[in-house]
Amino acid sequence: MAPSTVNVAEYLFTRLYQLGVRDLHGLPGDFNLLACDYVGSSGLTWIGNCNELNAGYAADAYGRLRGLGAIMTTFGVGELSCINAIAGSFSEYVPVVHIVGVPKTVVQKKNAMLHHTLGNGDFDVFARIAKELSIAQANLMDPVTAPDEIDRVLRACYIHSRPVYIQLPADIVQKPVDAKLLDSPIDIETPKSDDEKEGVVADRILKKLYAAKKPILLVDAGAGRHCVEELVDSFARKTLLPTFIAPMGKGMVNEDLPNFVGMYNGALTPIDAWRDMVESSDLIMTIGNVKSDLNTAGFSYNFNKLNTIDLHFDNVSMDYAIYEEIYMRWLLERLVREFDSSKMRKEQTDLPVISRPPVAENANFSKEEITHEYLWPRLSSWLKTGDVVVADTGTSYVGIWETKLPPGVHVMTQILWSSIGYGVPACQGAAQAIKAEGSGRRTICFEGDGSFQLTVQELSTIIHHNLDAIIFVIENDGYEIERWVHGEKASYNDIPKWQYSLFPNAFTPTEKTSERRVKAYKIRTREELEVLLTDKEFSSGKGLHFVEMHMPRHNAPTSLINFTETLKK
């Protein structure tokens, strides 16, 4: 017989489960310990991370794949440790639920000088900080209103794809609420646009499209964050518009589409003909475009606003006007449904014949060395449909731009927030999400040695939970991306020398060695890399395969070199 009541913690965790969360990242602390007791019984697996920052990065990656990620920390010291990760999720539109175990309500009301506080009796200071980094907040001080508050905040997280913040007082955890409330699912459908208003906007867009001589489509990160990739694919296939991606949109478009052209990155667009095609267009339609510095090559987009239509989650920008509460999902559905191909002229969708330049090799380096010019194009034939690729801040998240992706590859980067050290924890979160979905997809991570030194501990979490991942640590003797920005020979861009390939074994418990599927490699040449990429066991992605991959110092992807040159002008 089903219980008539559940406690507040069980209600919260069950709601997370109902929304697709299967794993709760975080760390225990004295103010959330009681809540931790109810994680497993609510259907969730507790993922004890090595620190809160790592847990936040992992929850971010999990949220990008599952539609919702969740982390639980303790008050003050725990929540502040993960705030960098939460800020990244906020800036990059990632749905993460941050649950904070806070002191008992009776203690808060007394303004007591409690540990983990600033010693001034102010128990709201951290919540005020969190308000700047979350789309919705709730303080569950009253068990009567707790279910409604939980539902409100979780709905906001899911729909708006941004972090939310929930305070769970220690003396509220076990307060009973009506279990029947869980029988009514949270409404997570994207709000509907006003039908008449949406119809007017759709009609104007289509008229502009039919009238344009050289229209193009530019797809960016917002398409993935708001889960409209399939609609974008349908729209691109039906209209046959020449289709481009921005750097943050890598992986959002099937690169095998007959009308897919390539990446547009302002002044750094890799082929001049691509850049000319976009910038000479008389109608540029963007979906989820993020006009940040790195995503526009230093704000070098050369668009005429009168020729641009921007679709965002809840608005459309067109003709110097913003049409609010027009939701991307429903507008795209309408455009796909109402588009009439007979009204398009053939020359509108003609693609120019563009020959891609051969992969260049830097003559300064031996042919035997692994270089960026060699690595990223080489991966094009090794990656498989469904792969999840984590490319950490630095040479990796620029290098992946030069890889042609098979259909269905999900690329995970932090181009806007750009916090180094994201890679390994994000790899753990992604691998955990894939384990939850049971798809068997590969999780592949590329991270520089400098970034790796920040969050190396999360390798132990990957091993502890027996996750599948392939991790490449690029050993190029320091902060290579910073050397290109400034300080080519400066000591502050150097890092301590580590024996990276020894870490997987160091993090594997001696008594469990035979049970763990952990292999480490140390490679320096292209021949050694080719051996790995053609090895069936390695390429299966089963178990942890950790590669210490050496590259020459001061070697970088062409796009990074070109970008840093523009900064120096």
Image: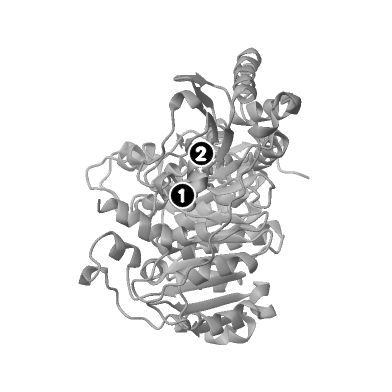
Give, as a three-letter code, the residue at label 1.
Thr
Percent across and percent down for residue 471 are 53, 71
Q: Mark yes or no: residue 391 visible.
A: yes
Q: Earlier in the sequence, mark 1 or mark 2?
A: 1
Q: Is 60 in front, or is 381? A: 381
Percent across and percent down for residue 438 are 71, 60
Circle 1: element type = loop
In the depicted structure, whether residue 521 falls above or below residue 52: below
Q: Do the residues under discs 1 and 2 have CB atoms within 8 angstroms? A: yes
Q: Residues within 10 Å of mark 2 (few under 14, many from 20)?
A: many
Residue appearing at x 25%, y 47% in the figure: 113
Q: Is 540 in front, or is 332? A: 332
Q: Which mark is residue 29?
A: none
Q: Mark yes or no: residue 51 visible.
A: no
Circle 2: element type = helix
Quadrant of the rendering where the N terminus is positioned:
top right
Task: Left or right? Give the position of 335 relative to 560.
Answer: right
In the depicted structure, whether residue 186 falls above or below residue 515: above
Task: Left or right? Give the position of 209 relative to 548.
Answer: right
Q: Which mark is residue 269?
A: 1
Please give the residue where the numbered disc 2 appears in the rendered image. Answer: 278
Percent across and percent down for residue 312 are 53, 31
In the depicted structure, whether residue 28 falls above or below residue 464: above
| Residue at the limit of the structure toward the top, as seen here | 196
Residue appearing at x 43%, y 44% in the figure: 266
User: Alpha-carbon distance for marks 1 and 2?
Assistant: 10 Å
Give, as a three-letter code, the residue at label 2.
Val
Q: Residues within 10 Å of mark 1 (few under 14, many from 20)?
A: some
Task: Left or right? Give the position of 55 relative to 116.
Answer: right
